Every structure is written in C-alpha cells, then in structure tokens.
C-alpha cells in the first residue's frame, strides 16, 4: 500500500475483466440468487454476477442508474462500498468451512475517478490462501488478512479501490 491517508493504493493496477471466469456450480448459482435477494445487499443497487464453484472467484456489478446515482450525477460511494463490503468475508467463510470465525475488521475505500458507467469488482482468493490460513492457525489463534479490490469499468479503468482487513480465528 502507499502512504495515502486511507492506506489504499492510489493507483491500483488496472486490468480488464476476466473473460473466462471459473464455472459456477448449481449450489453457487443458488447462493448468487439468494445474495441478490438479501435486502441489505439489494439496497446497494449492486448485483453478484458470478460465483465460482469453489468460492475463490466472485464478480460483482454496480449498474449506473437511478438506484445508484448520487446528487451530482455519478455513482454513489455508498453503493460502491456496499457492493464490495461482504464479499471477501463470505468467500473466506465458504472456503474455510466450519471451525473458523471470519469477521470484517476494517476497511478503507478511495474514490479515484467518478463513475458514470456500470462498474465491476472481481474478487479472487489464491489457491493456497485457505490452506495457508488453516495450516497457520492452531485452535483459538487468530490472524488478520488484507485484501484489495478495485471497482473498474468495462475497459479496466479503476474508479475506486477498497482495502478490507478480515479477522479470522480457528475455533477451539
């Protein structure tokens, strides 16, 4: 990270959206529909577009429209943060399984460029991330994990970046 006041990297690497996301399973497809019906998430105006079968990849979409537009004609920052808020926590809960407690600990969001188009966020956990957490924690021990996610337009231009810190504890 940089020394910006929020701690978020001011210029995250832009990257185009994945054209070949991992396949969804019937179970993750049902989770996606349920997630989008959850009133707290639905209120953000965002939608979960894709959940990989192993929960290591999630793509979220924030459409630009009357539900997400603020008073100055750009995407409302609350919609952007609300779109990304629960995702990494849910991904870790699903990949670690029972026996672990996962909570959001802190977050910082930096608004880099006003959004006037649909924005996307892609969340990915490395193949070794859940195993590293499982192997690194004895019962009752905890750790903090940091993740960075960018909200980008279809060309990959970064409009906002959010750093999430998650608390993970192995239950006794």
Image (cartoon, helix red, strand yellow):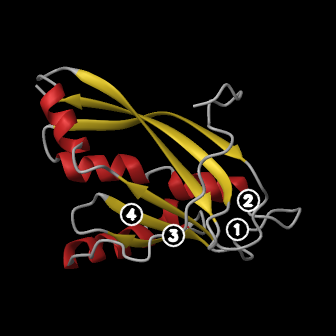
The quadrant in which residue 31 appears is: bottom left
Name the foreground residue: 42 vs 117: 117
Q: Percent x, y for residue 86? A: 44, 51
**Mark 3 Cα shell of 10 Å, populated few (<14), some (14-19), many (≥20):** some
- Secondary element type, mark 1: loop
Name the foreground residue: 26 vs 130: 130
Give the alpha-carbon distance from disc 2 to disc 3, as whole Å: 22 Å
Task: Indicate whether 62 appears above or below 160.
Answer: below
The image's mark for residue 147 is none
**Mark 1 Cα shell of 10 Å, populated few (<14), some (14-19), many (≥20):** many
Q: Which residue is mark 3?
A: 17
Discs 2/3, front:
3
Dot placed on the residue nearer the N-terminal end, 4 or 3: 3
Of all residues, the one furthest to the right in this rendering is 72
Q: Which residue is mark 1?
A: 68
Dot placed on the residue nearer the N-terminal end, 4 or 2: 4
> What residue is shown at x 29% (from left), y 71% (from top)?
22
Give the alpha-carbon distance from disc 4 to disc 2, as whole Å: 22 Å
**Mark 4 Cα shell of 10 Å, populated few (<14), some (14-19), many (≥20):** many
- Secondary element type, mark 2: loop
Dot placed on the residue nearer the N-terminal end, 2 or 1: 1
Q: Percent x, y for residue 92? A: 29, 47
Q: Which residue is mark 2?
A: 76
Dot placed on the residue nearer the N-terminal end, 3 or 1: 3
> What residue is shown at x 61% (from left), y 65% (from top)?
156
- CB under 8 Å between discs 2 and 1: yes
Give the alpha-carbon distance from disc 4 to disc 1, as whole Å: 21 Å
The image's mark for residue 58 is 4
The quadrant in which residue 165 appears is: top left
Task: Indicate whether 57 appears above or below 130.
Answer: below
- CB under 8 Å between discs 4 and 3: no
């Amino acid at each position: 990270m940089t020394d910006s006041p929020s701690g978020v990297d001011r210029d995250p690497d832009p990257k185009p959206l994945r054209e070949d996301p991992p396949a969804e399973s019937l179970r993750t497809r049902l989770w996606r529909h349920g997630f989008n019906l959850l009133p707290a998430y639905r209120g953000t105006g965002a939608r979960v577009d894709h959940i990989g079968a192993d929960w290591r990849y999630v793509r979220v979409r924030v459409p630009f429209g009357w539900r997400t537009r603020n008073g100055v004609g750009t995407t409302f920052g609350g919609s952007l943060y609300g779109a990304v808020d629960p995702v990494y926590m849910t991904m870790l809960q699903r990949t670690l399984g029972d026996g672990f407690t996962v909570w959001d600990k802190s977050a910082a969001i930096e608004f880099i460029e006003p959004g006037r188009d649909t924005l996307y966020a892609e969340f990915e956990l490395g193949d070794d991330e859940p195993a590293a957490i499982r192997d690194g924690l004895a019962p009752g021990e905890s750790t903090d994990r940091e993740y960075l996610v960018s909200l980008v337009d279809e060309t990959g231009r970064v409009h906002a970046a959010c750093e999430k810190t998650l608390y993970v504890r192995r239950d006794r």
